[in-house]
Amino acid sequence: MRTMERIFDIREDVLGAYYFRIPEIRLYWVVIGIVARAIGVSVEALTVVVLAHELAHAYTHLGHDIDNERWETERFARTELDIVEGLAQFYTQVDQLVCGHRHGGGGGAGLDTELLVNMF
């Protein structure tokens, strides 16, 4: 478990990242594989959650809101990390709850939603 502690002590994008200036999403397969095995879920299940989280970043950045406004890239870059991550986490949880129920699970493609909160 020391490996897991060290991985989660890193406060950077460990499992995946949304590079908003490009824009591009990258998933870090080796780390996803290590973490999935360590927490006892399939690589596929964890990948779905990580991808949902990174897509949430992209959608909040590039998507249009109800007033047809978009988040300008420079303003997105200057926004507090807690806000950007909070929005992505919120939409990730909603996605996992909806998809989990649709597929007969409790959310997160077999992942505990509480665990999901602590991963990001």
Image: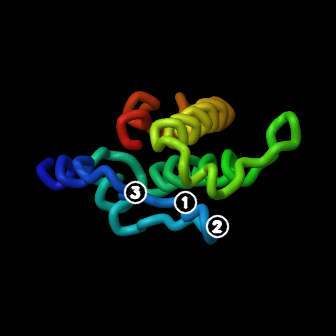
Residue 17 lies, in percent from the top left, at: 49, 60
Q: Are marks 1 and 2 in contact (CB under 8 Å)?
A: yes
**Residue carrying label 1:** 18
Q: Quadrant of residue 88?
A: top right
Placement of the C terminus among the 4 image quadrants: top left
Q: Position of residue 61 (x, y in %)?
A: 67, 51
Which one is earlier in the sequence, the residue at label 2 or at label 3?
Answer: 3
Q: CA distance from mark 2 to mark 3?
A: 15 Å
SS label for mark 3: loop
Q: What residue is shown at x 46% (from left), y 43% (from top)?
A: 81
User: Is residue 109 visible to us here?
Assistant: no
The amino acid beneath tag 3 is Asp
SS at badge 2 = loop
Image position of 13 with respect to 100: above or below: below
Q: Which of marks 2 and 1 precedes in the sequence?
A: 1
Q: Secondary structure at mark 1?
A: strand
| Disc 1: CA contacts within 10 A as few (<14), some (14-19) or many (>=20) | some
- 47 lies left or right of 94: left
Whether residue 57 is visible here, answered yes or no, is: yes
- Which circle marks residue 23 in the picture? 2
* Residue drawn at (50%, 52%) of the image: 50
- CA gap between label 1 and label 3 equals 9 Å
Residue identifier under label 3: 13
- Quarter of image, res 31: bottom left
Few, some or many residues within 10 Å of mark 3 (<14, 14–19, 20+): few
Amino acid tagged 2 = Pro
